[in-house]
Image: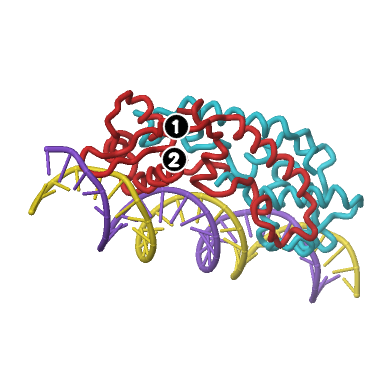
Chain colours: A red, B cyan, C yellow, D purple
Amino acid sequence: MFKLSKKVEYALISISHIKSSNTDKPISVRQISDKYNIPNELLAKILQTLSKVQILDSIKGPKGGYRLKSSLKDLSFVEFIEILEGPFGIADCMVDTDCSQLLNCNIINPMDKINSKIYKVFSDIKLKQLT
Amino acid sequence: MFKLSKKVEYALISISHIKSSNTDKPISVRQISDKYNIPNELLAKILQTLSKVQILDSIKGPKGGYRLKSSLKDLSFVEFIEILEGPFGIADCMVDTDCSQLLNCNIINPMDKINSKIYKVFSDIKLKQLT
DNA sequence: ATATATACGAGTTTTTTTATCGCATTTAAA
DNA sequence: TTTAAATGCGATAAAAAAACTCGTATATAT
């Protein structure tokens, strides 16, 4: 409960690694998955996603891999999470609208407040701070 | 990802319901599970837990049920969550100590900071505010 | 040409969460 | 004093979500 997913963890590790490698050469999935003990195929998928949303640049072929997108805008951590996991919310009813409790729900208000607080924490954190 | 568990939701609904019922008569699991569409047996378990940790008083037998413990101390929301779900942390490595990434982990520091922030949000919220 | 990369959809396995079952105990009330 | 309505509790099952794998296609440096 209330855990960050491996997807998010692996993505942060990768971006952090690429950033700190200080080279112009693309970094391959293999390099990262080996070093940090991350399943190769799974990481590949994640980096593909990051490439699609313009966080990484991908280079195909031998000596290929990923580079940080130079134009990388200042993403918030929520935006980052939502790229990988979809809409953010601490309960389904914050995202969907159908809930078998909804009619009688007596905790919607406090839940909504908590949700906003957590959302704000994650909005105030920027991806650049994390990596 | 990052969802509150049903356990926690059901527990909050129940406490809120009992509190707002303004009666001295015990409220049965059935009353609550019927009104809020919660599986009876599951809710029973949860209220048993709350009774064991002195949040609720249980009254057995017909006309039995649960009452708010009059001596209910001012629990924080994290404490409440930890009663139902065990130790709180946004990643396993915040709770356990074994992680196949640990040796090389390049995101422990930022993760730790995020964890503290979320923990603080949940510490600052009190159960009484929620119900 | 060949080997080394990414691209991507589909599928599988594992883990976690949610829910159920069965039996025991307590007790109010008929 | 029997019955029915309630909690107590361990074990198990079902469902959902998360984590991971596979197959095949495409691109490209050497």
The type of residue carrying mark 1 is Ser
Q: Residues within 10 Å of mark 1 (few under 14, many from 20)?
A: few
Front position in the image: B79 or D19: D19
- Asked if both marks, 2 and 1, belong to the same chain, the answer given is yes
Name the quadrant of the C terminus of chain B: top right
Where does the image place residue B41, in percent across and percent down from the top left? 67, 62
Question: For mark 1, what is the residue?
Answer: A71
Query: In the displayed structure, would residue B29 be above or below residue B79?
Result: below
Quick one: A75 or C25, which is closer to the camera? Answer: A75
- Res. B48 visible in picture: no
Q: Position of residue B94 (x, y in %)?
A: 50, 32
From this viewpoint, is residue A41 visible? yes
Query: What element does badge 1 sit on?
Result: loop
Residue under label 2, please give it.
A54
- Check the residue under mark 2 and report the chain it is in: A
Q: Is residue B18 above or below residue A16?
A: below
Q: Quadrant of residue A112?
A: top right
Disc 2 and disc 1 in contact, CB within 8 angstroms: yes
Q: Which amino acid is tagged 2?
A: Gln
Q: Residues within 10 Å of mark 2 (few under 14, many from 20)?
A: some
Q: Report the front residue among B19 and C2.
A: C2
